[in-house]
Amino acid sequence: MRNYTTEELIQFLYRETSEEKTRAIEKAVQMDWSLQEKLEALKDSKRGLDSIVTSPRHQSVMAILNYARTSAEVEQ
């Protein structure tokens, strides 16, 4: 049985594999418990990433706006 890389499993999770590779990975997962565990760990990680909401710090936004303002003054 083929050993799938982490990258291939991530592509599988994000539905970026061909139909042929998708079927092959699905079959391999059914037969290999260690691959099942690896895929479940990646699914947990994906769920965690999907739930993260981030935004830039206020200080960063203000620094960018100040830089843009001073750059615009120099160009005029």
Image: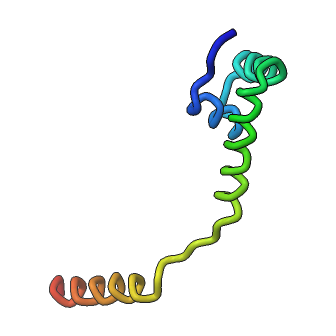
Q: Residue at x 57, y 72 (%)?
A: 54
Residue 62 falls in image quadrant = bottom left
Residue 33 coordinates in the image, percent (x, y): 78, 26
**Left or right: 73 as drawn, with respect to 21:** left
Q: Residue at x 68, y 40 (%)?
A: 14
Image: 66 above or below 50: below
Front residue of 15 and 29: 29
Q: Residue at x 65, y 12 (%)?
A: 2
Image: 54 above or below 66: above
Residue 23 falls in image quadrant = top right
Q: Residue at x 73, y 45 (%)?
A: 43
In the image, farthest residue toward the front = 34
**Left or right: 68 as drawn, with respect to 21:** left
**Left or right: 31 as drawn, with respect to 64:** right
Quarter of the C terminus within the rendering: bottom left
Residue 53 falls in image quadrant = bottom right
In the image, farthest residue toward the top = 1
Q: How is the image coloured?
A: rainbow
Residue 17 coordinates in the image, percent (x, y): 67, 27
Total marks in image: 0
In the image, farthest residue toward the right = 30
Residue 8 coordinates in the image, percent (x, y): 61, 28
Image: 39 above or below 29: below
Quarter of the N terminus within the rendering: top right
